[in-house]
């Protein structure tokens, strides 16, 4: 029996509890009586999968349908994969240990580009044909969602249908269509056709791409008449409590984010020009204080967690954040539940909340100025000032923190050496601020960490036409910063530039990247997001053998009228708006928070979608 | 008040390590609504302690732990509320109030009873046959791994009982072994020692262990279950 075989090999692997299943609040529905069986596949380890909020939300929604069940399938670690291959054990679900190929629908969440080889690994371990066109009538239907579904082309050969945008409602519609199709004995192709009619769903097999001599896209067209030429993203206009879990599985082992995550709002109005999430998740939608308190209370009762974190792109911008934190602290202080507020912008007015919530001092405070000079911060529309940063930092030091993390990006458009000097200056100013406080007032042991990641231009942002710096350029900048940041008390961290290059290729890749992906996987690439497993040489070999150049995707500036591989998706923000913002960035003009006045990003075309919009033209 | 809890950890959860188990129990107690006591100070934690940690891979029928409650609760109510909040695979079996001057459970434990299933039939038979002559040795020297390195130790005085039986077609070892700060014989040490004796390498993963219960000593040197 599969269960027994699995149990035996668990003795031979690291952290076996992550394959055990049976966690508190995990849901096991009867296999035989359920019409539609969905396997939620997270293409990375348990620790990362169980920290992901999206999986918890969709797990809850799918299991709530009386005719469906959802089980979690997570990529085992390399030692477990080896043991499974030795014993011929296919990839299995945590709840009932059914093999992946026994499910009706398999859904992958596309969280980050460096997880793509893991998707192929999971399909392979699950004994499912990797390519869409290879799948037979009784193979599961393979779907995918999540932020990277907005740039689906590199995975077009492997995924039967993409769900683009908010998943809560479209996933039920998709499952209903598949269930109906199966009941009516429709073929795979007929079912795919039905899926393509659903708003928010992209079915790659019904679209054809052709290329110019120079490699840019010539045309991207549907192959049949009733296939939409533009795919509109799925949008949930009002976030509802019924669609949010009131209980979540509580892991036995340690995971990355081991706490209740309360999504207080979705979307962002700041309009930072490098930020894809801020563009994709428009319009902004908030949950009410009453609803949040009810959710928080239910979640705490059903899990016994010691910490709740308020989650959103910029929690300080929730319209009544201080009221919310006060109300939550009232309920939870007695129950000894700590409240945390990550992702606070430096210019937020959350001083009250900060005092309330940070009663137990954690490891440190993080701020993200992103760029070293005001000029460059204006270019990227991150409107925080040096004054804001110094105010927050002073409050932190006075409040007893001595560990501060500063996040920056290097390789941003229009960046010059003055901007890099700015990073050094900011770090020095932060250090000086600390020493200006009298010894008795400040905590011991100053630790300032400056972290610089390499800018990756993202689709659906004003910088989607920009080039990424080459490896040489980035490495040169990293070296320069290393010398500038040789300051006492400051540590400099930087991201591996090779990984950033690969990210850039997939982030704005076309369908041909799928061939590189497959080749890289056959050459042994997997767990690319993990330092010890990333094989740069194998990736370069894969590009080479497929006759493609990474620089074409990563380091090439796009022309204004070039057809981009994601143009067929309507994400709400229009290409015209993005180009306008790009021009403003070159003029170093700041675009204010659109809560203060609609800036015609394009979402307002959809009546009723954005509460702040007025009838402006595109 | 101090409450002792005996609980069962089923074999589907045998890979949950001790620290993970502690965290799991803490969360279960939080869900239960029982009036738990927390320590004072900057980082308050729930007051609880275990009689003896269970090794990863082993499950237990009567494990023991102690918690502190702010208000008195009857053992029946305590068990009822806790069991309603425990996940599948963990179950509260019995509870009793501990006296204020009673020693900590860890200090009371003297021995533990184990049952090991030998999955490899060939080795199982060899081991079963060897028990009488194994126990007839004057000393039984085996290696014990500690933080300082590997030490040789005589485990004969730590084996209070040992016999081989058969259950469901498999040979099983029933053993009562010493479990104190100064003298602990782990089941794995017993297996290695048996392997040395029959001159066959026994893969530790081929023996699945269940801890059947924990024991203390009464004033006259007799073994009693810990909960008495």
Image: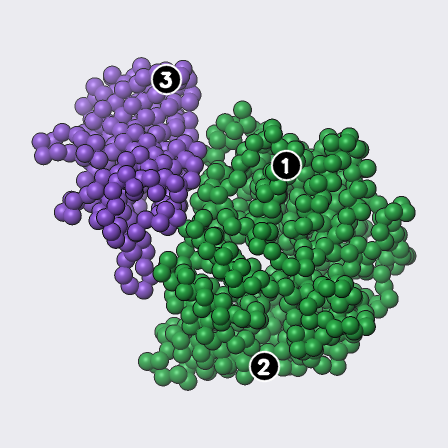
Chain colours: A green, B purple
Q: Nearer the viewer, residue A514 or A170?
A: A170
Q: Which residue is mark 2?
A: A385
Residues under labels 2 and 3: Cα distance? 74 Å
Circle 1: element type = loop
Crowd around label 1: few <14 · some 14–19 · many ≥20 (10 Å): some
Quarter that holds the C terminus of chain A: bottom right
Chain letter behind tag 1 = A
Chain bearing mark 3: B
Q: How many marks?
A: 3
Q: In percent of the image, x 27 and y 20: which residue is there?
A: B163
- Give B144 or A89, whichever is nearer the viewer: A89
Image coordinates of residue A302 in percent, x first then y, are 45, 48
Circle 2: element type: loop
**Which quadrant of the figure has residue B105?**
top left
Which quarter shows the N terminus of chain A?
top right
Assess disc 3: are there few (<14), some (14-19) or many (≥20) residues with their C-alpha within 10 Å of its C-alpha: few
Residue under the point 23% across and 39% down: B96
Taking the image as drawn, is residue A191 in sight?
yes
Q: Which residue is mark 1?
A: A67
Q: CA distance from mark 1 to mark 3?
A: 42 Å
Residue at mark 2: chain:
A
Q: Horizontal and vertical percent for residue A125?
A: 63, 36
* Residue under label 3: B167
- Name of the residue lying farthest toward the left: B220
Assess disc 2: are there few (<14), some (14-19) or many (≥20) residues with their C-alpha within 10 Å of its C-alpha.
some
């Amino acid at each position: 029996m599969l269960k027994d075989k699995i149990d035996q090999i668990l003795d031979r692997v690291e952290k076996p509890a992550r394959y055990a299943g049976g966690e508190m609040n995990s849901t096991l529905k009867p296999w035989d009586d359920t019409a539609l069986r969905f396997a939620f596949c997270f293409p990375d380890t348990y620790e990362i999968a169980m920290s992901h909020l999206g999986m918890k939300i969709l797990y809850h929604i799918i299991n709530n349908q009386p005719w469906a069940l959802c089980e979690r399938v997570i990529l085992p670690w390399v030692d477990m994969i080896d043991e499974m291959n030795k014993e011929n054990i296919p990839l299995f679900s945590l709840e009932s240990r059914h093999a992946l190929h026994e499910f009706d629908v398999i859904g992958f969440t596309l969280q980050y580009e460096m997880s793509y080889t893991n998707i192929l690994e999971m399909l392979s371990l699950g004994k499912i044909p990797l390519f869409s066109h290879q799948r037979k009538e009784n193979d599961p239907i393979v779907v995918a969602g999540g932020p990277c579904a907005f740039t689906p082309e590199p995975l077009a050969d492997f995924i039967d249908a993409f769900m683009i945008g908010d998943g809560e409602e479209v996933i039920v519609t998709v499952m209903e269509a598949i269930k109906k199709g199966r009941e009516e004995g429709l073929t795979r192709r007929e079912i795919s056709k039905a899926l393509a009619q659903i708003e928010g769903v992209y079915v790659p097999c019904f679209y054809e791409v052709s290329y110019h001599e120079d490699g840019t896209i010539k045309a991207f067209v549907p192959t049949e008449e009733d296939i939409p030429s533009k795919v509109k993203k799925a949008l949930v206009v009002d976030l509802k409590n019924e669609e949010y879990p009131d209980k979540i599985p509580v892991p036995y082992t340690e995971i990355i984010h081991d706490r209740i995550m309360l999504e207080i709002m979705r979307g962002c109005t700041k309009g930072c020009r490098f930020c894809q999430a801020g563009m994709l998740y428009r319009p902004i939608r908030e949950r009410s204080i009453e609803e949040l308190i009810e959710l928080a209370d239910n979640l705490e009762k059903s899990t016994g967690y010691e910490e709740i974190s308020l989650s959103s792109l910029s929690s300080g911008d929730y319209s009544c954040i201080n009221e919310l934190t006060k109300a939550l602290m009232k309920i939870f202080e007695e129950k000894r539940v700590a409240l945390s507020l990550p992702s606070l912008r430096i210019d937020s007015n959350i001083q009250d909340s900060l005092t309330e919530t940070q009663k137990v001092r954690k490891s440190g405070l993080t701020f993200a100025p992103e760029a070293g000079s005001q000029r460059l911060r204006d270019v990227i529309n991150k409107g925080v000032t040096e004054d804001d940063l110094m105010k927050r930092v002073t409050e932190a030091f006075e409040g007893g923190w001595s560990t501060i993390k500063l996040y920056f990006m290097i390789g941003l458009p229009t960046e010059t050496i003055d901007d890099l000097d700015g990073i050094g200056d900011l770090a020095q100013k932060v250090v000086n601020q600390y020493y200006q406080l009298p010894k008795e007032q400040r905590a011991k042991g100053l630790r300032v960490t400056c972290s610089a990641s390499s800018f990756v231009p993202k689709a659906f942002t004003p910088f989607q036409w920009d080039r990424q710096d080459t490896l040489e350029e980035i490495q040169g900048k990293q070296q320069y910063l290393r010398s500038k940041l040789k300051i006492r008390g400051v540590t400099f961290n930087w991201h591996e530039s090779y990984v950033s290059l690969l990210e850039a290729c997939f982030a704005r890749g076309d369908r041909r990247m799928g061939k590189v992906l497959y080749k890289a996987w056959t050459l042994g690439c997997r767990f690319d997001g993990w330092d010890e497993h990333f094989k740069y040489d194998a990736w370069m070999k894969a590009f080479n053998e497929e006759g493609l150049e990474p620089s074409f995707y990563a380091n090439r500036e796009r022309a204004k009228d070039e057809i981009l591989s994601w143009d067929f998706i309507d994400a709400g923000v229009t290409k015209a708006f993005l180009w306008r913002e790009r021009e403003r960035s070159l003029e170093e003009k700041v675009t204010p928070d659109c809560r203060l006045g609609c800036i015609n990003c394009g979402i307002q075309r959809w009546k009723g979608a954005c509460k702040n919009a007025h009838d402006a033209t595109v | 008040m101090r409450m002792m809890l005996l609980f069962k950890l089923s074999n589907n959860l045998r890979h949950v390590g001790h620290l993970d188990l502690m965290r799991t129990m803490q969360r279960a107690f939080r869900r239960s609504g029982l009036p738990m006591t927390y320590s004072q100070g900057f980082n308050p934690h729930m007051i609880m302690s275990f009689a003896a940690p269970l090794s990863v891979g082993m499950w237990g029928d009567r494990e023991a732990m102690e918690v502190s409650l702010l208000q008195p609760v009857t053992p029946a109510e305590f068990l009822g509320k806790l069991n309603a909040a425990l996940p599948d695979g963990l179950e509260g079996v019995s509870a009793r109030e501990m006296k204020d001057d009673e020693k900590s459970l860890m200090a009371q434990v003297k021995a533990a009873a184990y049952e090991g299933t030998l999955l490899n039939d060939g080795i199982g038979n060899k081991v079963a046959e060897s028990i009488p002559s194994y126990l007839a040795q004057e000393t039984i020297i085996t290696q014990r791994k500690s933080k300082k390195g590997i030490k040789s130790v005589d485990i004969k005085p730590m084996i209070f009982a040992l016999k081989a039986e058969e259950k469901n077609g498999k040979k099983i070892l029933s053993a009562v072994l010493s479990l104190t700060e100064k003298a602990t014989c782990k089941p794995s040490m017993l297996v290695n020692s048996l392997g040395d004796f029959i001159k066959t390498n026994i893969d530790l993963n081929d023996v699945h262990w269940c801890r059947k219960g924990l024991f203390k000593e009464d004033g006259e040197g007799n073994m009693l279950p810990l909960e008495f």
